[in-house]
Image (spheres, rainbow, N blue to C red):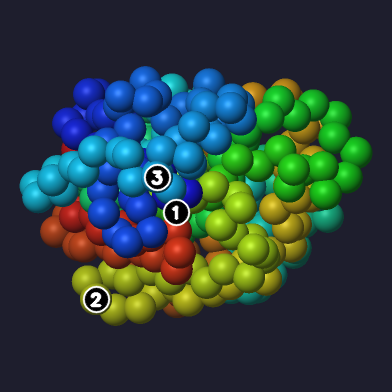
Amino acid sequence: MKLLRVGTAGAERPALLDAGGTLRDLSGLVPDIDGTLLADEAALDRVRAAAAAGELPVLDATGLRIGPPLGRIGKIVCIGLNYHDHARETGAEPPTEPVVFLKAPDTVVGPNDTVLVPRRSVSTDWEVELAVVVGRTARYLDSAEEGLAHVAGYAVAHDVSEREFQIERGGTWDKGKNCETFNPLGPWLVTADEVADPQDLRLRLWVNGELKQDGTTAEQIFPVGEVVRYVSQFMTLYPGDVINTGTPAGVAMGRPEPRPYLRVGDVVELEIPGLGRQRQELKDA
């Protein structure tokens, strides 16, 4: 299923995009798309059955904002330097264990919402990523196969980053990763049964129409199942938590000087086939 949330920010309603591309209202069946729903297999089965029977009301998509596809996110766990080609372009040694950092849930916005360039920013960068949404509580998992079994679905994420804040201002990466609007998510949460192989997904990103990133999850150093298993050794993952699994080559930081960092007025578009497409215009914070 392709699950999503539509409406004004803070007042989104749950919806479903059916196989024919028609937007359907889920608000009469479930209160929201969140961890509570994802952990309730019976509720998900009711949604599937209603969709298959054509019982869900049609929503008029004209002018309707698409919000983040997941509400009440508990935490966002991010994996850094998780693509062989991205490590090469930045001159970094591939890590022997996943690089883990956290991003605040309040960075999440809709897939087509405005992204704000932080005040005094000189190095705002783009990163298209595969987001993993947890569907079952995961703690101390034993295998990558168990890791995949705890995944409810997948989404497109834009892990916007301010590189000077991240790398040159001391401390941890958090300052460069947690600026407001720095995690557009969606448009859809695609349930795991629709993704045959999470290591066979193409990720692309354009800036002002120019293709900047064109990679594949086959380049991941630590694949999705292993990432979930690994993270579960250090923190408990709950339904509705999100893992951003890293970005392929092509970011501004990996390019020669003068690096083409994002500026106000730029338009960023990103896509993972089957998971949907995003578009953001950058404005001043």
Nearer-N-terminus badge (1/3): 3
**Splitting the image into 4 quarters, where does residue 107 fall?**
top left
Residue with the mark numbered 1: 156
In the image, farthest residue toward the front: 53
The image position of residue 172, as x and y in percent, is 58, 35
Residue at 33% x, 32% y: name it.
Answer: 26
| Left or right of 113 on screen, residue 146 | right
Task: Give the residue type that dot 2 points to.
Answer: Gly
Task: Give the residue type that dot 3 points to.
Answer: Ala
Task: Give the residue type that dot 1 points to.
Answer: Val
Residue with the mark numbered 3: 53
User: Dot 2, crowdedness within 10 Å: few (<14), some or many (≥20)?
Assistant: few
Residue at 66% x, 64% y: name it.
Answer: 197
- Observer-nearest of 206 and 194: 194
In front of the other: label 2 or label 1? 1
User: Dot 1, crowdedness within 10 Å: few (<14), some or many (≥20)?
Assistant: many
- Work out whether 27 lies above or below 110: above
The image position of residue 118, as x and y in percent, is 27, 41
C-alpha gap between disc 1 and disc 3? 28 Å
Please indicate, yes or no, whether residue 169 appears anywhere in the rendered image: no
- Dot 2 falls on a residue whose secondary structure is loop
Nearer-N-terminus badge (2/1): 1
